[in-house]
Amino acid sequence: MPTTTSLHNGSELNESFIESTKAVFSMMLGCTVELAAATRSTNFKSSHDLSGIIGFSGALQGTVVISVDQEVAFSAAEMFLGTRPTEIDDEVRDMVGELANMIGGNAKERIPITGILLGLPTVISGKGHRVSFEPGAHIEHMAFETPWGPLSVEIGMRVPGTK
Amino acid sequence: MKVLVVDDSGVMRKIIIRSLNAVGVNDTVEAGDGAEGFKAFQADSFDMVLTDWNMPVRSGLELVQDIRGAGSQVPIIMITTEAQKTQVIAAIQAGVTDYLTKPFESDDLRAKLDKYVAV
């Protein structure tokens, strides 16, 4: 079986996450999200209310963080469940984790590398919370606009054996 | 018709159960991982099982192996983000009846359910 072990460039990775984010919102929530900005940094600090974190291992290692504000989380929960939450409870956190799971999982299928493993999602909530990546890691930050407000996708990833 | 829905996300279970309700299935049992799912499966009689793959404690693939190992031929639909060919083949070899990848449109899920609810 042919096995791809490297990415030609970082844009393939970014493009996978851009397309997966769009697909998840379009298919599961029936709405369009647009990429507003894409930047690379070594200093990332979340300024959103909720973050869903997915770990990648195997042929591609690192972390992806999907962050939204309360308004986006509540609106998405209303679309999924039919009722609008009034507070950030376990169900809202669960939904953010599932969004992260689907975005990460769908991106994994688009990345031209075989043997990638996906972990279970972890969710952090609270204003001003901080998610740290590996020191010195290059973090790709993609800012999206949803109909309800901003969503950000941060990727800190590397192929084992490369820098 | 009684359906067992296994997913570690309560939100995803609700989404699936809403689709089941929409095709006329109202008798459902929920479980949050493969171990809980097999326990529920052994304690009751089901006409269909819908399961995620990646779950804590015991995965959906292990649940499928447990159910088939117990001699049951109940239809099992795997609903998962895992879509690589090798994984789909592994699921089929384990005994999965049908496969739906996340994300999905509600019509896709309903079409799958219709297929087995009609039977």
Image: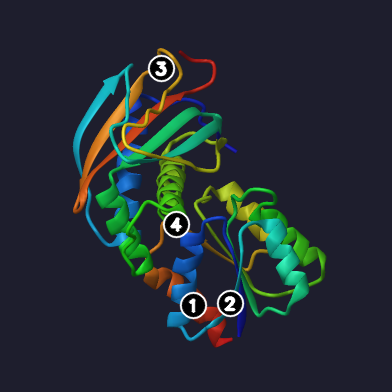
Q: Which residue is mark 3?
A: A137
Q: Amino acid at mark 2?
A: Thr
Residue at position x 46%, y 47% in the image: A101
Instruction: Using a 10 Å C-alpha cutoff, classify the residue at mark 1 as few (fewer than 14 neighbours), some (14 to 19) or many (20 or more).
Output: many
Front position in the image: A50 or B50: A50
Q: Which residue is mark 4?
A: A91
Q: Amino acid at mark 4?
A: Glu
In the displayed structure, A33 sits above or below A39; it is below
The numbered dot on residue B20 is 1
Marks 4 and 2, how far apart in space? Answer: 19 Å
Q: Amino acid at mark 3?
A: Ala
Identify the element where label 4 is drawn: helix
Q: Is residue A71 left or right of residue B53?
A: left
**Do the residues at pointers 1 and 3 share their chain?**
no
In this rendering, the label closer to the viewer, 4 or 2:
4
Marks 1 and 4, how far apart in space? Answer: 20 Å
Front position in the image: B12 or A131: A131
**Do the residues at pointers 3 and 2 share their chain?**
no
User: Residue B112 appears at what percent x and percent y?
Assistant: 49, 73
Count how many numbered circles sit on residues in the image.
4
Q: Amino acid at mark 1?
A: Leu
- Quadrant holding the C terminus of chain B: bottom right
Q: Chain of mark 2?
A: B
Marks 1 and 3, how far apart in space? Answer: 44 Å
Marks 1 and 2, how far apart in space? Answer: 9 Å
In this rendering, the label closer to the viewer, 4 or 3:
4
